[in-house]
Amino acid sequence: MGYSYSNIQLKKGSLPIDPEKIAEKLAAEYRLKRTESRDDADVTVAIGPENADLWITIVSEIFDEDLEKSCSIAKALSEEYRTEAIAISCFDSDYLCLNLLDVQNNVDAWAACGCFPEGKAPRRSNIAAWKAYIPDVEAMRRVMREHYDFAEECLGGLEEILLLPEAQGQVCVDFAGPEQGYRCWYYTAETAGTSGTPTTIRPASYSRNIGFDWYSYAGFHNIAAASRGAGVLFSGKAVTSGNVDIREAWIEIKDKRGKLTGVPIEWKYKYQGRIENRICTGNPVELKKVTLSDGEQGFYGEAPDVRFLETNWDGLPMSKARRMYYDREILIRFYAIRKCPEGVSPGSLKVTLIPLQNPEGRGTHEAEFRD
């Protein structure tokens, strides 16, 4: 997994730059409300560092990993402050691009290195267009043509050419706080994008690992409103036939600050063929054998204190919505015991997560066991 980020470098010019005005303008496009709490913030705008000599850095989830938006914002800032702006974006450490905007002089220059990860690159480099803004255009060409294991390493050679302080071109929102000399404005999503839809669970298709002799897991997402209380049901052919016994289960879920809720639990998992131990925080579920309405057997338990967070990413910037989606994944971890002989397929297992306040909003994973 590589490094992905976006930032905007705004050059100090003859007009005074108002960081708070910039932050408020960026936030105005979304349903965001100012908050003083960094922990409660859904979106941050960071501008600085406060001791910057030539270039001011702007970072935010509002345009992070959104190339079109970051370039558009850089252009608007160049026009408003009558100076140069550079939108810098890196994609998974495979592709780095810089878009120089000087609206007053009708300049829109591009420089890039590496391979764009999603098909055709957005634009071709035109290094010659940078000539009036850098001391040595040939040096820039050489830097951009070099091979780098990680695309962002290219900035090491560009910083001197662009008169950027060391590592300033690699700043992202996670590393631009008051501790680093940045002024920060925090925002929460003012309204949720769920329109009052009750808690609705969907399985995360990419997230499941079901087997024996380690703690298996199945992942889920709540795609609607908040609620409290969860039920967990294990069913399917593997359970009804008596081929599998589910001994332990718990729900792994995070609060709004991204911290796991519940109590410390020690568990073991399989990684590259070996069993490893880990301590995690989760919400235990006491399971009981039950008979379902269709005659199937199952194991069922409840965790009444589990809180499903509201999903409001419809009104959030793209990168923040994506991060929130993965951060708020709900995992059901469980320990399955094989009751049938080795070599005999135990059958499929259904893992169902049920919001107690809206049982119809349940979501189910169904998968075969693997050894």
Image (cartoon, rainbow, N blue to C red):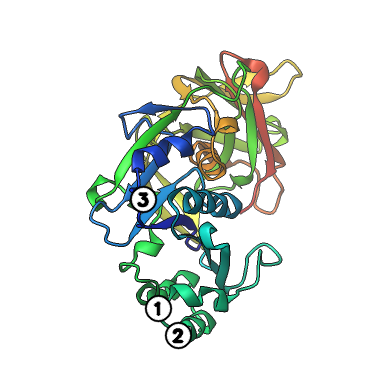
Instruction: Report which residue position mark 2 lands on.
Output: 139
- Closer to the eye: label 3 or 1: 3
Place of residue 172 in the rendered image (x, y in percent of width and height, measured from the top left) = 40, 54
Note whether 107 is above or below 139 in the view shown: above
- Closer to the eye: label 1 or 2: 2
> Do the residues bearing badges 1 and 2 touch, measured as CB atoms within 8 Å?
yes
The amino acid marked with disc number 2 is Ala
Query: What is the residue that sits farthest to the top in this orientation?
Result: 357
Note whether 339 is above or below 137 in the view shown: above
> Do the residues bearing badges 3 and 1 touch, measured as CB atoms within 8 Å?
no
Marks 3/1: CA distance? 29 Å
Place of residue 352 in the rendered image (x, y in percent of width and height, measured from the top left) = 63, 29
Q: Earlier in the sequence, mark 1 or mark 2?
A: 2
Place of residue 217 in the rendered image (x, y in percent of width and height, measured from the top left) = 54, 42
Determine if residue 57 is in view: yes
Mark 3: few/some/many CA within 10 Å (<14, 14-19, 20+): few
Instruction: Please state which of residues 331 and 210 is positioned toward the viewer in this rendering.
Output: 331
Classify mark 2: helix, strand or loop. helix
Note whether 251 is above or below 7 in the view shown: above
The amino acid marked with disc number 3 is Leu
Marks 2/3: CA distance? 31 Å
Instruction: Report which residue position mark 3 lands on.
Output: 15
Which quadrant would the C terminus be assigned to in this image?
bottom right
Classify mark 1: helix, strand or loop. helix
Place of residue 341 in the rendered image (x, y in percent of width and height, measured from the top left) = 65, 48
The residue drawn where x is 63% and y is 17% is: 197
Query: What is the residue that sits farthest to the right in this orientation?
Result: 294
> Do the residues bearing badges 2 and 3 touch, measured as CB atoms within 8 Å?
no
Instruction: Please state which of residues 166 and 231 is positioned toward the viewer in this rendering.
Output: 166
Instruction: Report which residue position mark 1 lands on.
Output: 157
